[in-house]
Image (tube, coloured by chain):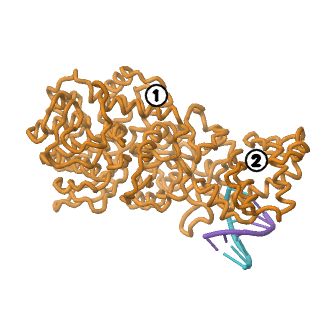
Chain colours: A orange, B purple, C cyan
Amino acid sequence: MDVGGSQDTLEKKTDDNDLDKNGSSDPVVYQLVRVEGDGTLVPATEDEFLQFEHFLHDERVDLSSIDDVAHVEEYFTNDCTTLKKPDYEESPSKLDTSDVQADTLDAGLEEDRLHALDDSINLPSNCSAVHDRQPDKLNTELGGNNIPQQNNASTETIKSTVLNDLSAEKEKGDASTRASVSGVTSSVPDFSILRGEVYLDNLTIRELQEAFRATFGRQTTVKDKLWLKRQVAMGLTNSCDVPSSGCVVKDYKVIGMGAKQEIPSVKGIPKMELEATLVRNQFMNPGSSFFYQGGEQQRSSKRLKRVPTENDEPQVTMFTEQGTTKRIRKPTKRYIEELSDIETHDSTGRLSSPVKRAVHDEVLLRPRAIMIPFREVDSSSTTYNTREDTLGGYSVHVPYVSRMRRGRPRSNFVPFLDLEPSVEYTEVHHADRLNLEKDGEQRNHKNTKWKGEHIETADKKEVHGLQGKNLSDINPQIKHGGKRKHHQAWTLSEVLKLVDGVARYGAGKWSEIRRVAFSYSYRTSVDLKDKWRNLIRASRTNDGVCPRKNNPSAIPIPPSILLRVKELAENPEMQPHAGDLTLPIKFSRESTKVVQGKGSGFL
DNA sequence: TTTAGGG
DNA sequence: CCCTAAA
């Protein structure tokens, strides 16, 4: 039950600290805010954003020297994105509610930042905590870690990095104090502060700050002891569920409290490392990521919404997710489109006003794609890479990969459109990228799937003011009356499910079928209907002939299936077979025979 | 909202 | 796939 590792990781790079009781992470994007005299948080003004933006840019530049920049960038690119914690109050002391949800930590960090801000009034510098680590250090760490698949695992890499940070006892504290408020310090945290047995209660504020730094990789100016203790405990524990006092830290691990959610360390292997391992493993088993489930059902999720439901699964999943996430999390075309849509109005490519963002964010709220356990870090120019969603009750940021909504666009919302397949295709470079599928099954043709997400492309463009493509170029429809939005090729498994569903419930019961077999898919009943129609067409036509040969993304449909489709289409009566849902699909022998050799249909 | 159809 | 009309 510990999901912690990832969080630590996050903190390092993105500076988030989301820990949850469940262990689910709750990545959060920070928003630049200003602390008013009365302690209330006020969204930063556009100007402030701009300032920050610059700052970030610089950071970015630095990071560019890192290997696998693209990935790293993705994760480090965050910045003052949104973090609206409605009820969060600034005083640190209020953070101790354990049920505060992951937000607590975030809030904490935020606060920390805010404090810093207080100190140095208008410099958003601390917002950069995200970019805490120096490039060189990062490199070192990266290299130091024996993380094999760097490519496909930026996440892991990062994690490892964090691990090293924590476990690295070498770097002795020292000038930790000199760390700048900005959070970008060149000095190395004094990890030793957390070595051996340490009673947080006995630490001085300064020591706690050091511990904080060792834990989160960034400096804090907060002098609230309680808060610091909690932060450290939470950070080491990856859980929000920590007592306000009495925590004992031993070799970077929190003990002496209900450090339940912790991953037990094994023989001196730092917990973090274990976590990293976990992540890695998870990563290796994409199959375990049931996370991606499409997400229609998650749309309604709201931030802060925490579902008490706690399974062990989420945690495990989290790992998986993370591992997977990293790779996958690429902005979708749609995302870009959206951005474009919004940003387009802003020829300068600057950040849109807070208000706009807010609105946008709102819109982005209903994702359905891959969840990203990590906090999303966006480039200054973009805050839209991910959207927040709820995963198992935790709000997380997910890459904005999928279509938000199916069906008619809202009256006040421009429909998101996907690029044309051809275009999209070109954008998909990383074959190695993990493609999450809604349900493990649909992994058939990765490349065709997710065409919409040309991550790096998007990132870069966005970073640079997202102008790479013109909105119109990308999404014809938005600007002009364009073409179709997305095209998610149907996978064989989907087809099978559909056929099976029709067999059971009958054609026309799309809603039912969808509910039963595509509940976690973005396929809507209309999609099913359309698909069925196409299948029927194919079963007739195709039986022998291959319609659009020019459709590379179309996957061939086994003749047997087509035959079945045909049968179902022809004798609708013999359907409702409620009961054999468990059976995959029955292929009638004759059918198979008949159709065999005839050529396949295409999806 | 869900279906059925047209585009 | 999208969009609408109907229901």
* A54 displayed left or right of A505: left
Mark 2 or 1, closer to the camera: 2
Q: Is residue A62 visible?
A: no
Callout 2 touching callout 1 (CB < 8 Å): no
Q: Quadrant of residue A33?
A: bottom left
Q: Amino acid at mark 1?
A: Asp
Reading the image, the residue beneath label 2 is: A603
Q: Are marks 2 and 1 on the same chain?
A: yes
- Looking at the picture, how far across and down is residue A543, in whole percent? 89, 47
Q: Amino acid at mark 2?
A: Leu
CA separation in Å, label 2 and label 1: 36 Å
Parent chain of label 1 = A
Q: Is B1 drawn above or below residue A75 in the view shown?
A: below
Parent chain of label 2 = A
Reading the image, the residue beneath label 1 is: A68
- Looking at the picture, how far across and down is residue A400, in whole percent? 51, 49
Q: Quadrant of residue C1?
A: bottom right
* A143 displayed left or right of A287: left
* Secondary element at image label 2: loop
A241 or A333, which is in the foreground? A241
Q: Is A439 drawn above or below residue B4 in the view shown?
A: above
Q: Which residue is located at x 66 percent, y 48 percent?
A: A488
